[in-house]
Amino acid sequence: MIQTRTLGRTGPAVSALGLGAMGMSGAYGAADRTESIATVHAALGAGVTLIDTGDFYGMGDNELLLAEALRGRDRDSYELSVKFGMLRGPDGSFNGMDGRPEAVKTFLAYSLTRLGVDHIDIYRPARLDPAVPIEETVGAIKEMIDAGYVRHLGLSEVDAATIRRAHAVHPVADLQIEYSLLSRAVEAEVLPTLRELGIGMTAYGVLSRGLISGHWTADRVAGPGDARAASPRFAGGNVEHNLALVEALRRVAATKGCTVAQLAIAWVAVQEPFIVPLVGARTRERLAEALPALDVTLTADDLAEIEKAVPAGAARGDRYPAAFMSSLGVGN
């Protein structure tokens, strides 16, 4: 069974590896619903307790899928992390954020209904709404915590100053933000702030959307509906450079007797005891590969070799298309 980690000073104890469910609802092209549900079941069976979703994943489809996968389970046997507030059009377009207090409560009501639960364990705005002070958004979540509909406050993709402002209103359990060998901007200010304030981190994108999984190739074409088709790091000219980094990482992984994916996940997990990597496995096969990452021991020498293979800032291309970069609290 998987060891646990506590998300900050005030957050819950969760499995040291979490399951990110976004890819099960079309973010990377068509997904097999039956296999997705089987993957959730396999994760729970292996001891994974933290499951992350967003109310805008698949326009609510992801929450409905999880409701089906979790039906009949003891509600205290798993923790649900839910992001809210991202506005979308019927064509799938992204149209900003809504962090107004009245919107927070509406989004929450819909999520509780779709998921078929009476509370959310960690509730967080998906991005900062530039038109609404973070204190107002957090204040609404605090009301929902006091009312019993939410257990813990989370944040997502915000900078250190915003973390401090939110934490002053109500203790933040964890920040969800991208962190991987290719995305290390959080190390400058965000990680020290989390350490100081006693806030956890759920790290997504630990495999850079499959780019450093060891399974992506330069000639692979992202299929219909796959967001990676618009990702700068997967673009021609960039992907070849980035995959050369993966090959260097593969050589280090070979010396450790593990896969590239396991090494990349282990690297994130070892950075801080309060970090919980989220793995976006859509199949039982990918989940089975990811789980042993927690058993990979990395020495100081190993970390130095990994740093040589993939130095900070070595990735080519932004982690999101240009239109999305402005909504992020930190860059690459």
Image (cartoon, helix red, strand yellow):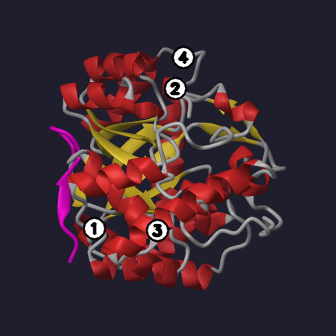
Whole-percent x, y for residue 205 in the image:
51, 52
Q: Which residue is mark 3?
A: 251
Location of the C terminus by quadrant is top right
Sequence-wise, which precedes: disc 4 or disc 3?
Answer: 4
Residue at screen point 32% across, 32% down: 191
Question: Is residue 13 rendered to the left or right of residue 64?
Answer: left
Q: Is residue 255 above or below residue 147?
A: below
**How many other residues sit within 10 Å of disc 1, few (<14), some (14-19) or many (≥20)?**
some
Give residue 256's quadrant in the image: bottom left
Nearer to the camera, 112 or 260: 260
Q: Which residue is mark 2?
A: 329
The dominant secondary structure in magenta is loop
Sequence-wise, which precedes: disc 4 or disc 1?
Answer: 4
* Amino acid residing under circle 4: Val
Magenta residues (range): 1-11
Question: Is residue 213 rendered to the left or right of residue 3?
Answer: right
Label 2 – label 4 distance at C-alpha: 15 Å
Residue at screen point 66% across, 38% down: 318
Q: Which residue is mark 1?
A: 294
**Mark 1 residue element:** helix
Label 4 – label 1 distance at C-alpha: 39 Å
Label 1 – label 2 distance at C-alpha: 28 Å
Q: Which residue is mark 4?
A: 132
Sequence-wise, which precedes: disc 2 or disc 3?
Answer: 3
Whole-percent x, y for residue 34 in the image:
58, 85
For the residues bearing labels 3 and 1, Cβ distance under 8 angstroms: no
* Amino acid residing under circle 2: Gly
* Amino acid residing under circle 3: Arg
**Mark 3 residue element:** helix
